[in-house]
Amino acid sequence: MYSGEHELRREAFLRRRYRFVMAGMLFLLLAAVLLSFWVGYYPLSPSQVVKAFLSRFGYKGEILPQAITIFWNIRLPRILSAVFIGASLAVAGSTYQGMFRNPLVSPDILGVSSGASLGAAFAILCGVSGWLIQLAAFTGGIAAVAASYLISRRSAHSHTLSLVLTGSMIMALCNAGVTMIKYVADPNDVLQQITFWLMGSLTKTDTRAFLWSFFPMAAGLAAIFLLRWRINLLTLDEEEAKSLGINIRAYRLIFIAASTLLSAASVCLGGLIGWVGLMIPHMARRLAGADYGRLIPASAMLGAGYLVLMDDLARSLLSMELPLGVVTSIMGAPFFVSLIIQRKE
């Protein structure tokens, strides 16, 4: 009786703590978004942000036309892109870490980032631009993960192990393809475009590019949010899960498809932005616990706020804008070292 009462009190405490943590992260996310409008060559004050937003709904007050253009065509698409890319990569990373029962797994474990890079590099080499590069990157990411999954199905080994090994092979092949394309590309033009895309950036993000990637990201997030409780079951041993009557293969396929949508759409919108899917789940796990019912929303919120702040740093650290992928790598490497040291201890 005492033990049951203790468990109820502990669960009530965890629920209150979780609500407090989520409220705090939501406040910090909104503060980071408002700060982002102020960062840049043309800073927008809070009053200008409000007036520019209301101008789309009939507001006729005093406001500069440049402020309206910057708000709707430059800052808002970029900030929303950072929010959704951060949330998508963090959720995909959390899902893969649970599904593969490995805390060092990142969203590109099945080759989605390498496949997207190969698709984008090939599209740039062919001279296309704009949304066609996004389409090529998205298609390449989906194709790489599909190849990893289908090849692993033919293996006699454990499906999880086969997926990881096949993903590593596909990743190596795609990276080799990118290297070959860079080798034959015109160094005065095409090579520069490919290199800039691979470094990751939100500089050229506009409303059309954001909307193109928004729908697959929304679909992937919705699927994982609705089934996030099932990820707890995938952390069990495969034989133990089967003994409970759980269709492991079906759930694994659903989560792989949803995570691939998130990762591929994120890469085709912002290029290669690393470490978010590896770092954020660990930080969220410390705040919200290991239960995936709570971890997935916490990862999404924390990932969104983190990438918004990293994009602000990329725009403000130097007189020229730094690639976002470089900034996240600089921040991620020390975290990874600390994670390895802690696990050794």
Image: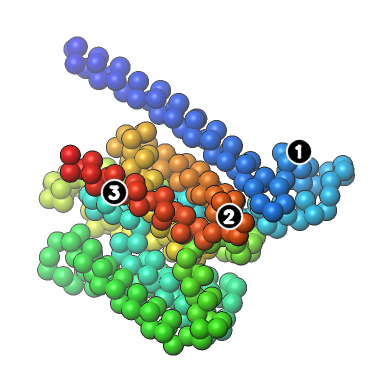
Give amino acid for label 2: Leu
Q: Residues within 10 Å of mark 2 (few under 14, many from 20)?
A: few
Q: Could you tell me which secondary element the residue under label 2 belongs to?
A: loop
Give the side of residue 84 with respect to residue 107, left or right: right
Outermost residue, top side: 2
Give amino acid for label 1: Ser
Q: Could you tell me which secondary element the residue under label 1 belongs to?
A: helix
Q: Which residue is mark 1?
A: 47
Q: Could you tell me which secondary element the residue under label 3 belongs to?
A: helix
Q: Which residue is mark 2?
A: 318
Residue visible at 19% across and 11% down in the picture: 2
Residue visible at 83% across and 53% down in the picture: 65
Q: CA distance from mark 1 to mark 3?
A: 43 Å
Q: Residues within 10 Å of mark 3 (few under 14, many from 20)?
A: few
Toward the viewer: 272 or 297? Answer: 272
Upstream in the sequence, badge 1 or badge 3? 1
Residue 124, percent across and down?
Answer: 52, 79
Residue visible at 72% across and 52% down in the picture: 42
Instruction: Evaluate if marks 1 and 3 touch, with contact meaning CB atoms under 8 Å apart.
Output: no
Residue 295, percent across and down?
Answer: 36, 39
Q: CA distance from mark 2 to mark 1?
A: 27 Å
